[in-house]
Image (cartoon, grey):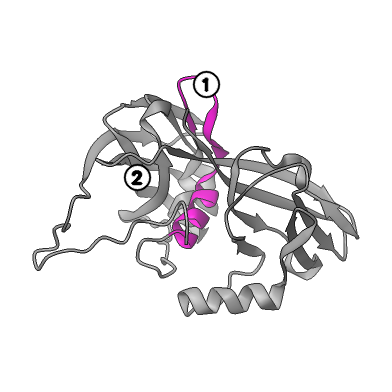
Amino acid sequence: MYGLTAPSVAVDAAGNPKGNLKLFMRQIIQKTFTLNTGIQDEEQVIPALGDVAALALEITVIATGTLTTPNKLSSALNAIRVLDPSNQPIVDTITGTDLKYFDKYFSPKGTAPTETDVSTSSATDTLMLPLSIDRKHLPARIKISAAAYSALAASGATGGTLTVRVMAYYRDGHTNTTDRIKKKTLATIAAENSFAPFLSKGRILRGIIFTYTAAYFTDVKISRDGSDELKLNDNQLAAIERQRFISAKTSGVAYVEPSPFYVSDATEVVWTSSTADTVNMLLVEADIAK
């Protein structure tokens, strides 16, 4: 893996990092929302204490009512957004469900995490977002939005609380790179669909998470400079995922990871559908701090 992958760090018998790499944590947000019928926001600053290596969101949900078909804990997060000092998105507006996919595909453990269901007793999960932010793009602002209590289950929720704790992990080294996450929702036709206009020219393409209707998906192709970088169908994506996680692929969700390269006018992403569909594309790109 490259870019968002958590660094491999040698540790001693006590679990402390060996060598020169040092990571330290600063708590950014500690907030308990009393869930109601609306959306509630909390915004804080990620200070410039060094290069950020990752963000972690610890969420605890206590629901009230008689829940029918509870959702996952991430459903209690309506949105997450991170902006740099120029008000440009480091993390575009993504949902708690989107965050769950990043936690899966970039898990430092190398295995797919199992997310907890909302329940009427206290339930807690930690969702990781390994994300390099160069100190030149700090201080940044992070905004967390709590969902309405109706998002906790198909029906039966009458209230509850959401406690969010956001931690930023800093490294003492200097990466000179800032990862950026961009989300696009695209309507496809029953043919080849070009997603190239939504890429950021001049940035490095790290990878793309797609969500889609599995029955309508044919294949996805990424090419650069006129030659194919990769072309994968659903069976091939499933085989890659089994190899990475030793687990079955989630239907309608895929992570596509080319060898990192700079996006140019010759870069192409082609999504082929057998039937018109709505596809969410979560782009993981990076720029070099200047």
Residue depicted at 34% across the width and 46% down the height: 56
User: How far is disc 1 from disc 2 in space, using C-alphas?
Assistant: 20 Å
Closer to viewer: mark 1 or mark 2: 2
What is the three-letter code of the residue carrying label 2? Answer: Ala
Q: Earlier in the sequence, mark 1 or mark 2?
A: 2
Residue 22 magenta-drawn? no
State the residue position of label 2: 53
Question: Does any portion of residue 156 appear in the rendered image?
Answer: no
Judge whether residue 97 is colored magenta. Answer: yes
Of residues 126 and 21, which is closer to you in this image?
21
Q: Given the current orientation, which residue lies at the most extreme top position?
A: 86
Which disc is residue 135 wearing?
A: none
Going 51% across and 19% down the picture, which residue do you hit?
86
Looking at this view, name the residue that lies furthest to the front. 225
Q: Are marks 1 and 2 in contact (CB under 8 Å)?
A: no
**x and y percent of residue 190 in the render?**
90, 60
175 or 26: nearer the viewer: 175
Residue 118 in view in this figure = yes
Q: Disc 1 designates what residue?
A: 87
Residue 226 pos. (x, y %): 80, 56
Q: Nearer the viewer, residue 94 or 105?
A: 105
**Of the residues shown, which amino acid type is indicated by label 1?**
Asn
* Chain part drawn in magenta: 82-106
> What percent of the width, then of the height, locates residue 191?
90, 60
